[in-house]
Image (cartoon, helix red, strand yellow):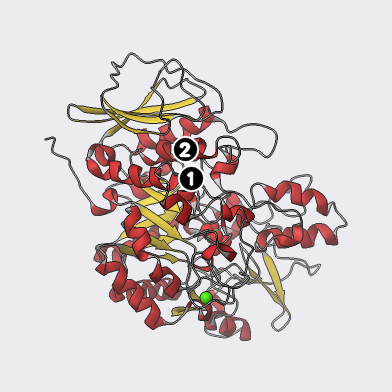
């Protein structure tokens, strides 16, 4: 047996993201809730899940479905009570799983008492907990920065005649981390949840916490009214000092797991984020592999996907740790975008699954991904719930622009695609609820649902179960070294994992065409660990979206 260095429980874990609003409705009001999640814990256990990441369940007026928090110490009324939460945590632990929460501290809701105080007067003690600024001489916004959710980042407040800053929606004012009192309040709140027994945090929008306002007006692209803000509000100098404080005064004191949402981080600056010594978090969700698919124009680009993920694998080797994911509540369904949800629905869902899941890192599954849920068939812009699209729609309408084109633009990649209710069975409303849910169920629930796939040994769900069991069957899938095979192959993503004298080969054709793998490895077919076709494997003729794992 090879000795593995630096073993950690969170490296061996398989994680599952629950978007509570859409997971399971226990009291039939059309909205998912905490008791609904409690009812499904056995399902998650049976799937092989170790860690549940719960998207925000805190008190919130729901401008951005819980990512706008009005009380960090209370549960959203629609989701239940703190007693329900305590029971959830206890039951998760009883079943040998762990629970991590979403830490949303770039901003609060405008209905949070801190902001209500802050906006009440110029000299309120909490005035400086948020960013306030005077209008320009002509009365316009303090600068020309654009919100990530469209429109200006500044909202005028009549009461005191100043603007406040919001990187996301105007109901999500940004906290001013420059103020030590704010950092202290965040740290105290984190420790309150850790003392309650939660097992970690997914840390929302954390690369945006520091802004360089000194940069002033930025250049505006021709077709825009405001300036994209990434250069002034992502990964700014000084951010790491604040995160170090968070690590010293909170994270380092507990046996927990942390994953930062890290838009804008690349493998070369990842050390300060996830480096064994310098890192502030155990792992991060990086974004580099997400934008590899363009509406209509081109197909999913296998080569770029491979290049990006290979770079992350090699740069973090022995120094950091990757979080592996292809879907979440902000992304469309991959089987509809990167795969083919029509002719190769099963094959493309499973091939994409094996390819990302068996790399080195902690894999995350987003609810419904494990049954191959697809994008929603949007037919009108009015169907969207996402605050970002709603803002854009309002702005385009005000400017007399083409609102029809917006539907086309967002149909495939908007954030609502992954937020439709979970498809549990083929009864009305997919078994999610007995009443019409807050967001429509995808009409394909009669064919795509958990119950049907539990009864089918050749289902996507069964493939995920096998994949998870395989990953847990040997340290090689967690700790083994990653190396690309046939790196220049434009259709097939293939790699080996190596631990001591053991080696496994993972192959996935990510196209709908037959492909060929070029390799000098001596591949014998007597120890196939996983395969999504029931035909014989032929390396010179790999079928559309065929995937397999072979022990060499
Ligand atoms: C993150 C979340 C997203 C949310 C935003 C603002 O990107 O994943 O859902 O809207 O932060 O909190
Ligand atoms: Ca409910």
**Label pair 1/2, CB-CB below 8 angstroms:** yes
Circle 1 residue = 326
> Residue drawn 66% across and 46% down?
412
The reply to whether residue 70 is in sight is yes
- Does 428 sit left or right of 98 as displayed? right
> Residue drawn 68% across and 51% down?
377
Q: Residue furthest right?
A: 400
Where residue 224 sits in the image (x, y, percent)?
77, 50
Q: Nearer the viewer, residue 432 or 359?
A: 432
Sooner in the amino-acid sequence: mark 1 or mark 2: 1
Which image quadrant for residue 65? bottom right
On screen, residue 232 above or below 338: below
Report helix, strand or loop for mark 1: loop
Where residue 284 sits in the image (x, y, percent)?
41, 50
> Residue drawn 39% across and 75% down?
189
On screen, residue 421 above or below 3: below
Which of the labelled discs sits on residue 354, or is there none? Answer: none
On screen, residue 449 above or below 308: below
Report helix, strand or loop for mark 2: helix
Image quadrant containing the C terminus: top left
Q: Nearer the viewer, residue 356 or 305?
A: 356
Where residue 251 sits in the image (x, y, percent)?
31, 64
Label 1 – label 2 distance at C-alpha? 8 Å
Image quadrant containing the N terminus: top left
Circle 2 residue = 352
> Residue drawn 81% across and 57% down?
396
Q: Residues within 10 Å of mark 2 (few under 14, many from 20)?
A: many
């Amino acid at each position: 047996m090879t000795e593995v260095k630096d073993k950690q429980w969170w490296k061996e874990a398989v994680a599952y993201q629950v978007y509570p609003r859409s997971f399971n409705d226990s009291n039939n009001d059309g909205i998912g809730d905490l008791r609904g999640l409690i009812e499904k814990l056995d399902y998650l256990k049976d799937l092989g899940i170790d860690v549940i990441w719960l998207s925000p369940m805190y008190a919130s007026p729901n401008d951005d479905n819980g990512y706008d928090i009005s009380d960090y110490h209370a549960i959203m009324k629609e989701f239940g009570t703190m007693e329900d939460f305590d029971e959830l945590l206890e039951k998760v632990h009883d079943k040998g799983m762990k629970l991590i929460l979403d830490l949303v501290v770039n901003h609060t809701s405008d209905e949070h008492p801190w902001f209500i105080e802050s906006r009440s007067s110029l000299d309120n003690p909490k005035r400086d907990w948020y960013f306030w600024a005077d209008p320009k001489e002509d009365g316009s916004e303090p600068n020309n920065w654009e919100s990530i959710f469209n429109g200006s980042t500044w909202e005028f407040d009549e009461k005191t005649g100043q603007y406040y800053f919001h990187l996301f929606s105007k109901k999500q004012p940004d906290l001013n981390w420059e103020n030590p009192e704010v950092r202290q309040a965040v740290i105290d709140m984190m420790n309150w949840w850790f003392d309650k027994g939660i097992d970690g945090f997914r840390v929302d929008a954390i690369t945006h916490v520091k802004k360089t306002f000194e940069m002033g007006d930025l250049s505006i692209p021709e077709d825009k009214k405001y300036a994209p803000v990434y250069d002034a509000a992502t990964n700014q100098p000084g951010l790491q000092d604040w995160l170090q404080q968070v690590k010293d005064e909170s994270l380092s004191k507990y046996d927990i797991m942390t994953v930062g949402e890290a838009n804008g981080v690349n493998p070369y600056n990842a050390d300060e984020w996830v480096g064994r010594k310098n890192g502030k978090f155990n792992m991060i969700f990086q974004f580099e592999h997400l934008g590899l698919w363009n509406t209509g124009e081109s197909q999913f680009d296998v080569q770029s996907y491979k290049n990006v993920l290979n770079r992350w694998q090699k740069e973090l080797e022995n120094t950091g740790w990757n979080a592996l994911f292809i879907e979440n509540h902000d992304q469309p369904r991959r089987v509809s975008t990167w795969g083919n949800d029509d002719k190769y629905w099963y094959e493309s869902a499973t091939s994409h699954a094996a390819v990302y899941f068996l790399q080195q890192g902690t894999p995350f599954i987003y609810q419904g991904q494990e049954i191959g849920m697809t994008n929603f068939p949007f037919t009108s812009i009015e169907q969207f719930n996402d605050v970002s699209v709603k803002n854009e729609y309002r702005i385009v309408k005000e400017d007399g622009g083409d609102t029809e084109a917006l539907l086309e633009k967002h149909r495939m990649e908007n954030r609502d695609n992954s937020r439709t209710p979970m498809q549990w069975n083929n009864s009305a409303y997919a078994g999610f609820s007995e009443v019409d849910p807050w967001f429509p169920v995808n009409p394909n629930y009669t064919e795509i649902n958990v119950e049907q796939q539990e009864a089918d040994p050749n289902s996507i769900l069964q493939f995920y179960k096998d994949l998870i069991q395989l990953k847990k069957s040997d340290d090689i899938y967690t700790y083994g070294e990653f190396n690309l095979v046939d790196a220049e192959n434009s259709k097939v993503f293939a790699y080996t994992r190596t631990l001591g004298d053991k080696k496994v080969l993972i192959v996935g054709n990510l196209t709908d065409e037959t492909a060929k793998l070029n390799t000098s490895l001596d591949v014998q077919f007597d120890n196939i660990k996983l395969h999504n076709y029931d035909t014989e494997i032929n390396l010179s003729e790999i079928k559309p979206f065929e995937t397999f794992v072979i022990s060499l």
